[in-house]
Image (tube, rainbow, N blue to C red):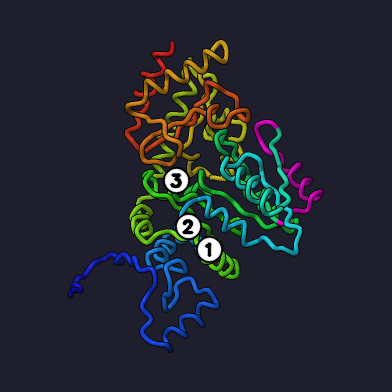
Amino acid sequence: MKAKNVKSTRTPIYRDAGFLLEDIPTMKKAFVDEINHPHNPDLYIYSRYRNPNVVEAEEHLSKIEGAKWALLTQSGQAALDVALSIFQKSNKPNKWLFFTEIYGGTNSFIDKVLVARRGIEAIRFAPNGDSYSLDAFEKALIETKPEIVFFEALSNPMLIALDGDAVIRIAKKHGAIAIVDNTFATPLLWKPLASGADLVFQSVTKYLSGHGNLSAGAVMGNDPELLKLAIEYRKWVGHMLSPDDAYRLIDMLKTFELRFSRHCQNAFAIANYLNNHPIIEKVLYPGLESHPTHNEANRLFNGKGFGGMVTFDIKGSNPKEKAQRCDLFIHQVANSIALVPTLGDADTILMPVEPVWGDKYPFPGMIRLSVGIEDQKELIKVIGNALDTLK
């Protein structure tokens, strides 16, 4: 029996696989309209194509990003696949340039999927020491003439900040498509589309959902033709978020700005505390003047904050002692700060760097801290007590 006269401020969850099309003319109209891939169709056909809950969440997300459209997927990696695959053409050379300091999963996707399976020519552009050279970047574009430039505003785990506005401007000057992974900075600190990026994508799993209990990704843009290509690709490969997760995400997005502001405030305070602690060798946080790319971060984020991630290196007389101290610190804070291989959670969590990144970052005393939204003083107390045991 259907409920009668039920009123709610929320959209019901539409778990339908296929939607009711009452007669042949209606079905015909639905499939004729589908040729143009409308984002919010008059007639829904099948949840792999579009779903009302997912579309509603996408509309919320596009407002936060300042985008004309947003598409949700079941993970950040699925969003990455959509963002890149819509530009792949069988009759083109598909030469794409990637900055090296990007998410490890993205680097693996490049090597294992784009290069090994699809034959993409991937060009890698590395930093000069602790920062990127814009002159070297422009020289690389002139020499290689890539179709796509892909980068992150803040790198993982060294938190190298880029002058993203300048990177986009130079890329467009040389006719390249600019795609930005903005997961660490989020639209609260920087909106790449406003600076001319063609696409921006997010691991929604992180700060946008923000509670460590939902997996999702998003691709966002302004070009309506790219939207059609992205809808079509997502439909045929099945990269669709579930209606239940979309329903939950809508509520999570309502607190995003409040949460991320607190992440930034807490991270700034903890970075400064660690930077003055005698047992800490180095703190990597773009909000610190000592960070090699502090000026770039200051310019790009315009005083809005510097993110919720802090990477720090514990002192030790040799690698073995540093590793032991790192292990002891993690053990000491375990009841309050868990070792969890993700980031952006409302709770503070951490990861040791060397076991995850290996030879790329062989620093046995280094920890990446994803700072949560807990009471700032309590967090510093927990961290300080643990560091005191290392003395």
Q: Count residues near mark 1 (Cα–Cα under 10 Å), then give few for <14, some for 14-19, many for 20+.
A: many
Image marks 2 and 1: residues in contact by CB distance under 8 Å? yes
- Helix, strand or loop at label 2? It is strand
Instruction: Please say if 255 is above or below 236.
Output: above
Q: Name the residue under label 3.
A: 206
- Seen as rendered, the residue at the extreme front is 117
Q: What residue type is labelled 2?
A: Thr
> On the image, which quarter does residue 335 sit in?
top left
* x and y percentages locating residue 223 in the rendered image: 59, 67
Q: Which of marks 2 and 3 is in front?
A: 2
Which label was assigned to residue 73?
Answer: 2
> On the image, which quarter does residue 227 sit in?
bottom right
* x and y percentages locating residue 280 in the rendered image: 50, 19
Which image quadrant: the C terminus? Answer: top left
Residue at mark 2 to residue at mark 1: CA–CA distance: 8 Å
1 or 3: tag closer to the N-terminus:
3
Residue at image point 56% right, 43% down: 105
Instruction: Please say if 91 is above or below 252.
Output: below
Residue at image point 53% right, 50% down: 77
Q: Tell me if 180 is positioned left or right of 204 in this view.
A: right
**Residue 257 sits inside the magenta stretch:** no
Residue at image point 38% right, 87% down: 23
- Seen as rendered, the residue at the extreme right is 143
Q: Give the range drawn in magenta.
A: 129-147
Q: Name the residue under label 1.
A: 234
Q: Which amino acid does label 3 sit on?
A: Lys
2 or 1: tag closer to the N-terminus:
2
**Residue 146 sits inside the magenta stretch:** yes
Image marks 1 and 3: residues in contact by CB distance under 8 Å? no
